[in-house]
Image (spheres, grey):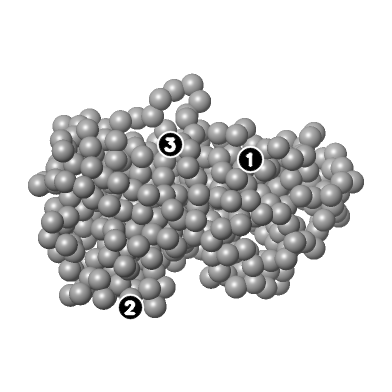
Amino acid sequence: MKLSRKNGLRASAIGALVVSGALVLSACGSDNNTETPAKEGGTTTSAAASNIACEGAKGQLLAAGSSAQKNAMDLWVKNFQAACSGVEINYQAIGSGGGITKFNQGQVAFAGSDSALKDEEAAESAKICKTGKGVNLPMVGGPIAIGYKLDGVDNLVLDASTIAKIFDNKITKWNDPAIAKLNPGAKLPDSSIQAFHRSDESGTTQNLGKYLSTAAAADWKHDPKSKSWPAQGGQAANGSSGVATAVKDAEGSIGYFELSYATANKISTVSINTGAAAPVAASSENASKAIAAAKVKGTGSDVALSLDYATKAEGAYPIVLVTYEIACDKGNKAETLPTLKAFLNYTVSEEGQKVLADAGYAPLPAEIAAKVRAIVPTLS
């Protein structure tokens, strides 16, 4: 799942957010986001190496999973390795599904996933963790943008129902009455909609499905847990980068991807009519407002979250995802445990969250961040 870097976050006066920054990121699928979009007109922020506690970190740490968090991981790895001489963090952005598979086969110390472990995946993790099990530690989140290319239409507004019908091949023309009603005064052409979706298993697809199943239940009858695209019709492209490129190149197109891809490719994004007073734009700040309302559904050391995809809160963008780092609560390999803990301590720290501002991610809400910070040192 990658996230936009051009929308900054303002610090919350009530402390709902940990830092002002800008989040992406379900046991995801192959969010094949391989390049790191650069921030326009500037450089990314780096943490001061002296502020990172290496705490016995050494050698190589292997990890794999969600590519929605790849931009964040690139920053974290760069800063951590600069601070901790001789340490190598090797994160493969192969998608959440691939990361969980590698984790449950004992090939990596942790996996990145855009959704929490399923019950059967958690049960399987006990074979690797031995004395424990895999737990979900939320680390970063952000908006899934609905990007489009339609000449003469700069501020397209859609709601959950119209999005569901477009991607389910039930609305096929741009001047459909349902779209026209949401966009009075817009010059909508009598042309076909080219809808693009992911060809690979994807947490981004899964989170979009959860949103549509919740906010447009009457119009989206597909399995909300599916990481594979469930609907008929449309055109497929590999990874968020593939979908973004397809939308950028095709007039009359629409697709979904992490906000950073829209920013990097200068793709217009849909504002969502949630039932609030005004349509809500896809931005990191607006996604943070939705994520701040998340409830912890995990127990003990597990911090799996339940997101409110049907939120009508003012300024809350509802199509969001949260990326977890999945690690053993107990039974981690002794040779990699110090590095695992030091690295995750850094990523969830205020310093680790702050460096995400220029990368377009939203930080964890304060209460959730505090819970994760308390759990990471207890990994054993």
x 26%, y 75%: residue: 126
User: Of discs 3 and 1, which sits in the foreground?
Assistant: 1
Q: Residue 359: give its label.
A: 3
Q: Are marks 1 and 2 in contact (CB under 8 Å)?
A: no
- Local crowd at mark 2 within 10 Å, few (<14), some, or many (≥20)? some
x 41%, y 45%: residue: 70
Query: Does residue 291 appear in the picture of this structure?
Result: no
Q: Secondary structure at mark 3?
A: helix
Q: Is residue 128 above or below residue 59?
A: below
Q: Hey, which quadrant is residue 205 in on the image?
A: bottom right
The residue singled out by tag 2 in the image is 123
Query: Does residue 78 appear in the picture of this structure?
Result: yes
Q: Are marks 3 and 1 in contact (CB under 8 Å)?
A: no
Disc 2 to disc 3, C-alpha distance: 34 Å
Q: Secondary structure at mark 1?
A: helix
Question: Is residue 81 found left or right of 294 in the rendered image?
Answer: left
